[in-house]
Amino acid sequence: MSALLTTRKAAIADIPFLTQIEYEASLPPFDHCFWEDLLEGTGTTALQFIEAELRADGSNWGDVGDFVILEEQGKPVAAAAGYVPNGEDYSPLRLSRLDAIAQELGWSIATTSAFRDRYLGLFGGDVKPFFLTPQAPWIIENVAVLPEARGRGLGKVLLKAVLKEGRSQGHSHAGIMVINGNDRARHTYESVGFKPYQTFYADYFLDQFNIEFPGVTKFGLCLN
């Protein structure tokens, strides 16, 4: 790694930066954050919600302490989370923390209830999101490089640092997932050794959730 590039674990003070990272990670390949649809009518932006979620320990896809931050000349430019999946709930939000998130946002009981119902309609209810079942004991999520720092291979540097962290924690395998059509992310993942593990095509989402979605491909990598 260049002397200009360093990595470190994230801390509470990094939440504003991690908020931007989570948001950027949610955009490809549609340039649209899925939280925006779920937040419709709440008066809350996706960035506000993500920050409240991080402050309330409300994410199933990596708490603040799970993130590795890549810095260039001391400035954070990229980050990703590596975490052990919740054994019962693989969806993005830790619903047991929704009231704490709502308190951070100043939501009313009615707004919180409406959001909960909308969220469960997509990620819960009678149809569990099987496609989110982890393919490895340790999962990498929320991988992003700030827009102004892209095009210089920093994503690959970041992933190598995250994988090093996974090895140091003694994990045997890592998993990562990409929305079909996000070819830039796929090429980056494959460049550090990830191999396709399972693909859920558009028909799966139309049949199971009645939504038009290009599907996802899950990748795996042996860390030993």
Image (spheres, rainbow, N blue to C red):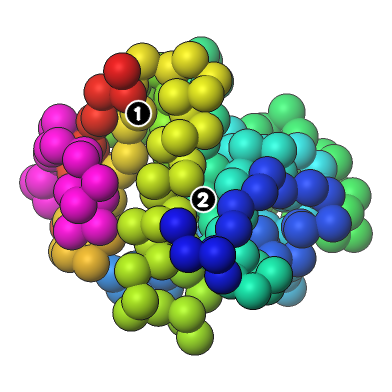
Residue 174 image position (x, y, % from top left):
35, 28
Write down the region rendered in magenta: 186-203
Magenta-drawn stretch contains 209: no
Which residue occupies 18% across, 59% down? 187
How far is disc 2 from disc 1 in space, using C-alphas?
13 Å
Please state if 30 lies on the left or on the right of 95 as rendered: left
Name the residue carrying label 1.
Answer: 174
Check residue 183 in the rendering and tell me which mark sits there, or answer none. Answer: none
Please state if 126 lies on the left or on the right of 194 as rendered: right
Q: Nearer the viewer, residue 117 or 133?
A: 133
Check disc 2: other Cα within 10 Å, few if <14, some if 14-19, many if 20+.
Answer: many
Which residue occupies 60% across, 53% down? 7
How many numbered tags mark residues here? Answer: 2
Q: Quadrant of the C terminus?
A: top left
Check disc 1: other Cα within 10 Å, few if <14, some if 14-19, many if 20+.
Answer: many
In the rendered image, the vertical position of residue 4 relative to residue 119, given as above or below: below
Answer yes or no: do the residues labelled 2 and 1 have beta carbons within 8 Å?
A: no
First-in-chain label (2 vs 1): 2
Magenta-drawn stretch contains 198: yes
Residue 177 image position (x, y, % from top left):
30, 43
Quarter-wise, where is residue 126 in the image?
A: top left
Q: Nearer the viewer, residue 151 or 204?
A: 151
Please state if 38 lies on the left or on the right of 74 as rendered: left
Kind of residue at badge 1? Ala
Name the residue carrying label 2.
Answer: 80
Which residue occupies 48% across, 15% down? 170
Q: Nearer the viewer, residue 7 or 15?
A: 7
